[in-house]
Image: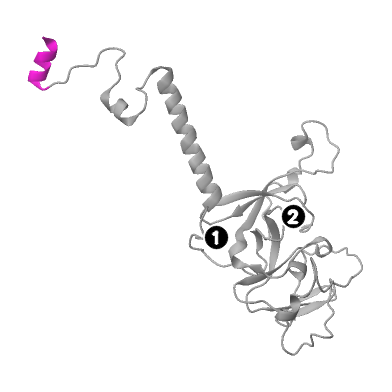
């Protein structure tokens, strides 16, 4: 009788205790309250957090760890850094598309890129020395860009004796020949680690070097870096730990380089 009266008056009857509302059934989710409702709220919260993490990691900023000494003393082994993925245009996963870039890489930018010559493929950090169209040469360890020597206070000052580059194989200079200006005699060209070029950077490519010139597998050996593999610009160090320090547990605290945390990368 109450239900009939409620229908006549236009007021829906209240659901019986323990029943599931039609809207909840239609949405395929449990009604609020109880263990099932609590679990559903947690699943939604975790799902939103994962989606936000993936979006931020892909399109905005990403964390990297420095595994080698090729950028010493600017970056040390054990430094953890944040890179700006949005600046140069982020790669859309599983596609060839990129988001619009705010600007292109510039001289002295420290960039994160993913070269194809590493196996397994890993991200690498180097410094932009040459942009498309630049002519780059190294004479007695001093880099010249478009005929002008560069002041590079960030370069590791200690160095080993110079050594010649092989013509072929990994690290060979065979690729240099196509980038030499027409005036350079290809037959007599014999580059070394500290004396090479001049090389003209082609369109759509960059010449990248490590700050620790004796310990860096960079453009001198592996060639120009295509623009499409440059992913982001290094911003700051958010944590650092010394892997060589003999420290007690927990090492991430006792071996931390606290003075490097928050250091802006230049």
Span of residues in magenta: 1-10
Does 5 appear in magenta? yes
Q: Where is residue 112 drawn, in percent x and y?
A: 65, 58
Q: In the figure, residue 3 lies in which quadrant?
A: top left
Q: Residue, x 58% and y 64% (percent of image)?
A: 228
Q: Which mark is residue 75?
A: 2
Q: Residue, x 35% and y 29% (percent of image)?
A: 28
Instruction: Please tell me which residue lies in front, 11 or 188.
Output: 188
Dominant secondary structure (helix, strand or loop) of the stretch shown in magenta? helix
Task: Relative to 118, say whether 243 is above or below.
Answer: above
Query: Under tag 1, what secondary structure?
Result: loop
**In the drawing, does residue 7 fall left or right of residue 160?**
left
Dot 2, how many residues are within 10 Å of its Cα: few (below 14), some (14-19), or many (20+)? many
Dot 1, how many residues are within 10 Å of its Cα: few (below 14), some (14-19), or many (20+)? many
Q: Where is residue 86 drawn, in percent x and y?
A: 53, 57
Along the polypeptide, which appears first: circle 1 or circle 2? 2
Instruction: Please tell me which residue lies in front, 163 or 107.
Output: 163
Task: Relative to 183, say whether 46 is above or below.
Answer: above
Q: Quadrant of the C terminus?
A: bottom right
Query: Under tag 2, what secondary structure?
Result: loop
**In the drawing, does residue 83 fall left or right of residue 22?**
right
Q: Which mark is residue 87?
A: 1
Q: CA distance from mark 1 to mark 2?
A: 21 Å
Q: In the figure, residue 155 lies in which quadrant?
A: bottom right
Q: Where is residue 229 drawn, in percent x and y?
A: 61, 62
Q: Where is residue 171 drawn, in percent x and y?
A: 79, 67
């Amino acid at each position: 009788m109450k239900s009939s009266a409620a229908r006549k008056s236009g007021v829906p009857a209240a659901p019986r205790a323990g029943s599931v509302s039609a809207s909840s059934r239609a949405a395929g989710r449990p009604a609020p309250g109880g263990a099932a409702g609590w679990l559903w709220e947690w699943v939604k919260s975790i799902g939103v957090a994962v989606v936000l993490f993936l979006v931020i990691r892909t399109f905005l900023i990403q964390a990297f760890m420095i595994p080698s000494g090729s950028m010493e003393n600017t970056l040390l082994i054990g430094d953890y850094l944040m890179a700006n993925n949005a600046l140069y245009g982020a790669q859309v996963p599983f596609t060839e598309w990129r988001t619009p870039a705010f600007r292109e890489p510039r001289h002295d930018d420290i960039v994160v890129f993913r070269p194809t010559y590493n196996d397994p493929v890993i991200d690498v950090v180097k410094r932009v020395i040459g942009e498309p169209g630049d002519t780059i040469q190294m004479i007695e360890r001093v880099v010249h860009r478009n005929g002008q020597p560069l002041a590079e206070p960030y370069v590791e000052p200690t160095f080993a004796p110079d050594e010649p580059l092989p013509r072929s194989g990994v690290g060979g200079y065979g690729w240099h020949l196509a980038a030499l200006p027409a005036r350079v005699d290809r037959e007599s060209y014999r580059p070394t680690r500290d004396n090479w070029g001049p090389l003209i950077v082609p369109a759509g490519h960059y010449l990248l070097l490590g700050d620790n010139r004796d310990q860096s597998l960079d453009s001198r050996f592996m060639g120009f870096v295509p623009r499409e593999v440059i992913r982001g610009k290094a911003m700051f160090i958010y944590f650092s730990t010394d892997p060589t320090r003999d420290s007690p547990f927990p090492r991430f605290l006792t071996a931390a380089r606290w003075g490097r945390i928050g250091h802006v990368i230049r």
